[in-house]
Image: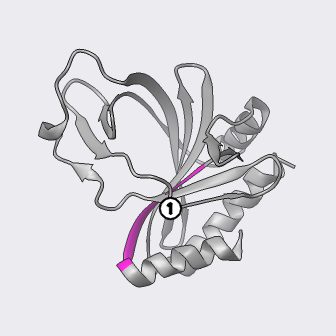
Amino acid sequence: MSEVFINHLNNLINTNKFINGEITFGKLENNFFNYNINKRSYFTFKNFINKKYKSHNFKEKIYQYYDYLLISKDEKSHICFRINSSDFKYDVNDKLSISYKTNNNYIVDNINFPAIDKYNSEVNKVYNKFSIKFKNSIINIEFIEINNKFLSIKFTFNLHEKNFDNFKTNLNFLLNKLFHNFN
């Protein structure tokens, strides 16, 4: 893992004491991040994780209206976010890039999401979620399939100074397995 990225996370922890982070994998080209990754790499990594860890399956419908997202798991469960841009993007190698963002303080009250007939976009998201634990570090991996066309992998985690070293070990293990498929 890049020392620049680790330093970025460490600076965020020193400033905020706690971060709720998200790493999404794809390809950065001309400052545009394409979240769709190749099928072979996606399924090879997913099969490796699936053999070692238990998954939970989820389906969500995501509605977007300008810079708001409403995520609906069913007709009773909704959460609304304001879209935030990535804090950090970089190329890992010539085939893979990461996009990192901090998700702290982006949840908004659902009442603020407009009830209209037509949204800017609606997508159906199906994903398998795995929780990978190392001591006091937990990294959730989501294998995402959007509208049966796009494949994406996302790591989410909660990070603070007491689990930072274990997080780095956990992340390095997972990234080595993932990067192996992209070389």
Residue 68 in which image quadrant: top left
Tell me the magenta residue range: 16-24
Residue 162, above or below 96: below
Residue 106 in which image quadrant: bottom left
Query: In the rendering, at what x and y percent does residue 94 appear?
Result: 83, 50
Residue 35, above or below 10: above
- Of 155 and 90, nearer the camera is 90
Residue lying at 44% horizontally and 23% vertically, measured from the top left: 124
Residue linked to disc 1: 87
| Side of 50 where 92 appears, left or right | right
Query: In the rendering, at what x and y percent does residue 136 appear?
Result: 48, 73
- Of 154 and 89, nearer the camera is 89
Query: In the rendering, at what x and y percent does residue 58 appear?
Result: 43, 32
Visible residue check, residue 121 = yes
| Side of 110 where 34 appears, left or right | right
Residue lying at 40% horizontally and 51% vertically, measured from the top left: 84
**Which class describes the residues within 10 Å of circle 1: few (<14), some (14-19), or many (20+)?**
few
* Total numbered labels: 1
| Side of 132 where 182 appears, left or right | right
Q: Is residue 134 magenta?
A: no
Q: How is this picture coloured?
A: one colour
Work out which quarter of the rendered image holds the N terminus and state it: bottom right
Q: Residue furthest front?
A: 30
| Side of 153 where 92 appears, left or right | right
Residue lying at 53% horizontally and 73% vertically, measured from the top left: 135
